[in-house]
């Protein structure tokens, strides 16, 4: 098979009929974690992102909607499957298993219910690679890949442990030019992802590649801060290298990022358990942002799931929440599943969203704010839903129209493979 091989994943076809015999086409999809448009705008305005600026005029820059909740796992799972959470089953990083009553971390491939685009492409004969910053994400996104030559799966976090047997390449650090694995709580973890991606293209080890970074910098720095601008300059350098190597590039993000702070400069947090237990002492609050990387956000975001003790408690709990300052939306289970395309069995009795500058938590004792250095920047709600959609080459007329009509971030593989004119 060639790089033009057509394949189907989750009721979508990838690869046009007129390319079935065409080889030499390398497609790279990039998820720039936490990249609200403001970050790209700031870097371009300072003259530090010339490649992204050029792509906007030569290829196209649009806006897309991420899936809700606007967290890493559900959005990366949607991007790599080309489908919403109702199809692939990952509705957050964390959920309450209704059958067992246990709070469960969705950090392994067993929770993904749909085949991935790279796995289906590999089955069709394409050479694929998945490179992430966090290893927990790599494990999910590499589901179904028979790792080995032609099927690469690497994370920044475990780059020093790569072998051909477990990762598809022997020495990711040597290939990337890094002397040691990057620290996960750093911008280097993301830059490594793109650097290794460029090396994979240069060495012609794969022709369909997914690169997913981490949002440590965005959690720590606003778009106009020097550290953020310098970080995007480094990303832009590697994106430019991918372009120089001839790759067709599609770029999006899993979510945006906002400060969750009061005007006085304090973290703005609405703790839900004390509020809802006024009405239902047996209610439980689940925060789907919860994951092992608490330095990023202290498990505080703008989205929560509530489980009530009995059906008759749904309405009074919802009414109490809607009277709470900072809470902007409360959807009961049927409405949440329909509006958010959420997996019904992994969605609570209601979901709760907060305002742009507001985070929601369980209770004060449930969160360690000491690692935040006084600054809380996070995501999860409606105000982090809009993300960039950027291509380094022009789209066909059909896909240009689609890009102007409310695209989703999980359409990016479709646009990159089927829509880019090359």
Image (cartoon, rainbow, N blue to C red):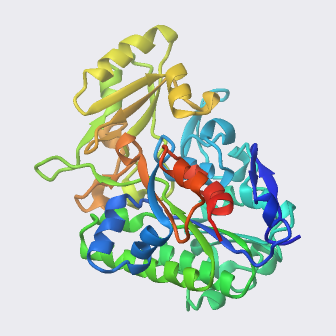
Q: Residue furthest top?
A: 312
Q: Residue furthest front?
A: 397
| Observer able to see residue 145 | no
Residue closest to the eye, 281 or 361: 361
Residue closest to the eye, 50 or 338: 50
Residue closest to the eye, 415 or 327: 415
Quarter of the image where one finds residue 248: bottom right
Is 380 situated left or right of 391 in this image?
Answer: left
At 35% from the left edge and 21% from the top edge, which residue is drawn? 277
Residue closest to the eye, 296 or 342: 342
| Observer able to see residue 84 | yes
Picture coordinates of residue 316, whole percent (x, y):
36, 12
Picture coordinates of residue 331, whole percent (x, y):
44, 24
At 51% from the left edge and 43% from the top edge, which residue is drawn? 67
Picture coordinates of residue 360, whole percent (x, y):
34, 39
Picture coordinates of residue 1, whole percent (x, y):
89, 70
Is 332 located above or below residue 43 in the figure?
above
Quarter of the image where one finds residue 179: bottom right
Is 315 situated left or right of 168 in this image?
Answer: left
């Amino acid at each position: 098979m060639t790089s033009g091989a057509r394949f189907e994943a989750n009721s979508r076809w990838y690869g046009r009929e007129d390319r079935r015999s065409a080889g030499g086409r390398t497609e790279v999809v990039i998820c720039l974690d936490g990249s609200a448009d403001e970050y790209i705008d700031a870097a371009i305005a300072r003259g530090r992102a010339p490649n992204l600026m050029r792509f906007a005029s030569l290829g196209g820059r649009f806006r897309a909607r991420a899936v809700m909740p606007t967290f890493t796992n559900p959005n990366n799972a949607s991007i790599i499957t080309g489908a919403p959470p109702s199809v692939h089953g990952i509705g957050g990083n964390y959920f309450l298993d209704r059958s067992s009553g246990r709070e469960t971390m969705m950090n392994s491939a067993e929770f993904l219910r749909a085949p991935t685009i790279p796995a289906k492409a590999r089955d069709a004969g394409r050479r694929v690679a998945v490179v992430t910053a966090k290893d927990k994400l790599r494990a999910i996104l590499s589901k179904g890949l028979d790792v080995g030559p032609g099927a690469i799966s690497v994370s920044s976090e475990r780059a020093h442990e790569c072998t051909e047997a477990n990762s598809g390449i022997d020495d990711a650090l040597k290939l990337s030019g890094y002397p040691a694995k990057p620290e996960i709580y750093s911008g280097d973890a993301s830059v490594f992802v793109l650097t290794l991606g460029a090396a994979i293209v240069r060495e012609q080890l794969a022709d369909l590649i997914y690169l997913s970074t981490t949002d440590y910098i965005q959690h720590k720095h606003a778009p106009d801060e020097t550290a953020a601008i310098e970080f995007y300059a480094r990303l832009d350098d590697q994106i430019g290298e991918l372009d120089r190597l001839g790759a067709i590039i599609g770029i999006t993000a899993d979510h945006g990022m906002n400060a969750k702070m009061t005007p006085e400069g304090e973290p703005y947090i609405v703790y839900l358990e004390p509020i809802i237990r006024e009405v239902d002492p047996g209610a439980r609050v689940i925060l789907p942002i919860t994951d092992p990387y608490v330095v990023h956000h202290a498990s505080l975001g703008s989205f929560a799931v509530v489980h009530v003790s009995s059906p008759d408690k749904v309405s009074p709990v919802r009414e109490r929440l809607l009277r709470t300052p900072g809470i902007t939306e409360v959807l009961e289970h049927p409405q949440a599943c329909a509006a958010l395309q959420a997996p019904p069995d992994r969605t609570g009795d209601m979901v709760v969203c907060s305002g742009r500058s507001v985070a929601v938590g369980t209770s004060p004792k449930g969160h360690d704010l000491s690692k935040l250095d006084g600054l809380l920047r996070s995501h999860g709600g409606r105000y982090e839903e809009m993300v960039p959609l950027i291509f380094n080459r022009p789209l066909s007329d059909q896909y240009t129209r689609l890009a102007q009509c409310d695209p989703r971030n999980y359409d990016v593989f479709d646009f990159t493979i089927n829509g880019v004119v090359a």
